[in-house]
Image: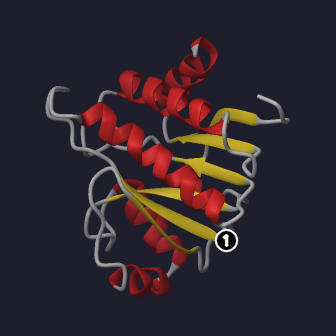
Amino acid sequence: MKRNLLIYATKADITTLPVDVIVNAANTSLLGGVGVDGAIHRAAGLELLYACRGLGGCHTGEAKITNGYKLPAKYVIHAVGPVWSGGSHGEAELLASCYRNSLKLAAEHHCRSIAFPCISTGVYGYPVEPAAVIATATVKAELEHESSIDEVIFCCYTDDDLEVYRKALKDG
């Protein structure tokens, strides 16, 4: 990579990170849910819900962007990850697509910093280790071609997830 690119994992509340954009592990309705999705909607305020209503939902593997409203982040990218169904139903490609589409939207909006949650590893049941490998490898590959983003944070909720994402970053 030609530029000074910082990619790391940390344990934090993604809604508190002072980055240009945070990624929401959204459901297809984009109208809020549990886990990180619910936390982002609560922290951003009702304006986020109103904005999401106008987006018409989102397909698995795709992403849409809104303002961040009451969040420190200027934007929220809502990425819909796959529900784990054993691994033979295109889950890996759909998960990678979430990261690619999120990075594309961030670049289109001239964002320099982005924070990702552990997409699909909560209620969607994606095993953390393969999800971390897909996430970190996809982001690294995409950023070889992307010039505007110079900081990527994998924001983990648990110490166990943090360890897995740090290992994936180191091994990848």
Amino acid residing under circle 1: Lys
The image shows residue 11 at horizontal and vertical percentages of: 60, 39
**Disc 1, SS:** loop
Query: Mark 1 = which residue?
Result: 74
The image shows residue 13 at horizontal and vertical percentages of: 57, 52
Q: Residue furthest front?
A: 145
Instruction: Give the mark count.
Output: 1
The image shows residue 86 at horizontal and vertical percentages of: 15, 27
On the image, which quarter does residue 3 sit in? top right
- Residue at position x 42%, y 55% in the image: 36
Specify how the rendered protein is coloured. secondary structure
Few, some or many residues within 10 Å of mark 1 (<14, 14–19, 20+): some
On the image, which quarter does residue 169 sit in? top right
Q: In the picture shown, does residue 160 fall above or below 62? A: above
Which one is in front, 146 or 83?
Answer: 146
On the image, which quarter does residue 120 sit in? top left
The image shows residue 68 at horizontal and vertical percentages of: 59, 74
Which one is in front, 50 or 44?
Answer: 50
